[in-house]
Image (cartoon, rainbow, N blue to C red):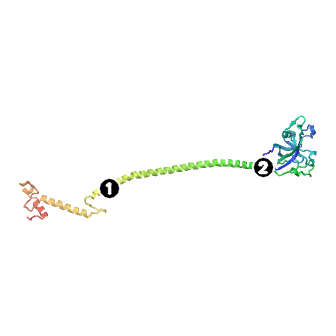
Amino acid sequence: MSNENDTPIQYGKVDATYFWDDGSGMQGDTGLPAGGEPMQKGLFSSPSWPLGTEGYIEYEGQTADFFIGDRGPGAPSNGCDVLMDLDGKTFAELTGQTWDAENYVVTGGNGHLYDVEYYITEWGDGAGEEGAPHPFQQPGNKCEGAVSEIPEDKLEEESSEEETAGENARSENAEGGGTQGEDGGEEETEASEEEGAEEKSAGSESSDESAAAEEDGPEEEEESGVTAETAANDVSGFQLTGADGDLAGGGILVLAIIPAILLALGFAWFRRPAGAHAGDADTEGRGLMAGSEGKHGFGSLLDRFRGGRDN
């Protein structure tokens, strides 16, 4: 059954009374409800609306759901006077009176309600006519005054409920997407972490290679220093060879002088005289280097070199 949370499609105000038709014949009972449903709380009757129509009413701040299950009232509907019959139980509750289930009456003295607000939320598919009600068996006498514009607050309330439902649905969809987005984000994060680890590993290897290069650097420098020092030692006296391996000028001079010196020494040695000039010490204790009058003495040879006397 529809209720006040459904969207109203027709609104108006009517006067109402009550009934209870269960086939007992009491209090003008005309038999079972025409709609085929047993008499029950919430079953209302209308002189013209389709059977099965659903809606709700409001009266003095109270609300009650209904569905049209019977025809009525009869004569009271003439002149668009009373256009709705409420079941006796609902009528008693709305008025604060008591329902007498034995006598099928509402005790308390009030048998009519005026300006009851009705909201139709769904038209029934049974016999009857939609729109403005008309008196019983007077289809040409439309009670247009019983229909009014639907209050905006009812439409806004329903619209707000639809928006809330839409927002809830979008929120659920967003949460579902957010989960997928998080999984994707986790996968991206894991991929980023792996890439970061690879970059970090590559950076570490690069750092290790740099460190190894720095460690190898001094050794290479030391080796280079030793080579340079050795090369410096090799050319500290005379640079015998040039960069291309050929003899330099100083090297040629040295090689030319050394044989001459060796030749002179050998000549002096093998040509030395016998006796005192052979190395025996003279009276002054001199030996090979002592002065000699002979032209073959070593001393005279040196004198010749020094530009000494001729013998």
Amino acid type at mark 2? Asp
Q: Secondary structure at mark 1?
A: helix
Across and down, in percent, residue 109 comes to: 89, 38
Q: Residue at x 28, y 57 (%)?
A: 234
For this view, does 232 lie left or right of residue 278? right
Most distant residue in the top direction: 102
When the figure is inspected, residue 263 is found, relative to residue 62, above or below; the finding is: below
When the figure is inspected, residue 271 is found, relative to residue 67, above or below; the finding is: below
Residue tagged 1: 227
Please report whichever mark, 2 or 1, sits nearer to the chain's N-terminal start.
Answer: 2
Across and down, in percent, residue 118 comes to: 84, 47
Q: Residue at x 69, y 49 (%)?
A: 170
Which of the two residues, 1 or 287, is positioned nearer the viewer here?
Answer: 1
Alpha carbon distance from label 2 to label 1: 102 Å
Q: Which mark is residue 153?
A: 2
In front: label 2 or label 1: 2
Q: Residue at x 18, y 60 (%)?
A: 261
